Amino acid sequence: MDTARMQEQFERMAEKARHSFWGYVGCEIERIDERQVVVSLDVKEHHLNLIGILHGGVHATLLDSAMGLVAMMARPDVDVVTSNLNLHFTAPAGLGPVAAVAEIAHLSGRMITTQGRLTRPDGTLCAMATASFRVIERKGP
């Protein structure tokens, strides 16, 4: 995909995201292309669980969102939906920034497999994930 088309698609996705669950959580797209996406979040108190660490659902949201975006960028002319998400929690995250990096692991006709890592700024791995996305025919504009 050429740079201008990728930038246009990125801007369209970012605008839609602001008005969705993604925007409510506070996710930010840091970098995006056909092979890799970086999504960040400044973890606030409302993102924490009862023991004061990043809630597992927020881990899942960040990783599923980043992996979904990279799947969408890999196949921009179709819609994709998560069909499987595997998540491994490896270290706690508290208040402050975290980043989810997602990459394409495998592409086929109807499936896209991705992998992702959620880290703190010091490089500590907080979670890692894989996900499969089913390619479906686009139903809308």
Image: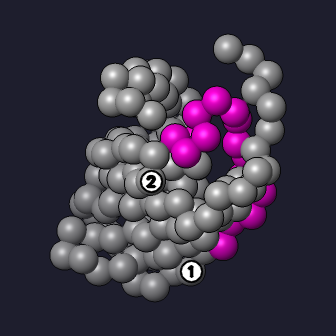
Which label is found at residue 88? Answer: 1
Q: Secondary structure at mark 2?
A: loop
Q: Residue at x 41, y 24 (%)?
A: 5
Pick whichever, 65 or 44, lies toward us.
Answer: 65
The amino acid type of the residue labelled 1 equals His
The amino acid type of the residue labelled 2 equals Arg
Q: Residue at x 76, y 51 (%)?
A: 109
Residue 11 in view here: no
Instruction: Name the residue tied to disc 2.
Output: 35
Residue 77 in view here: yes
Position in image of residue 68 (x %, y %): 58, 49
Range covered by the magenta-colored residues: 72-86
Q: Residue at x 70, y 61 (%)?
A: 132
Position in image of residue 116 (x %, y %): 48, 67
Query: Does 39 sit above or below residue 24?
Result: below
In which image quadrant can residue 125 be found?
A: bottom left
Position in image of residue 138 (x %, y %): 76, 27
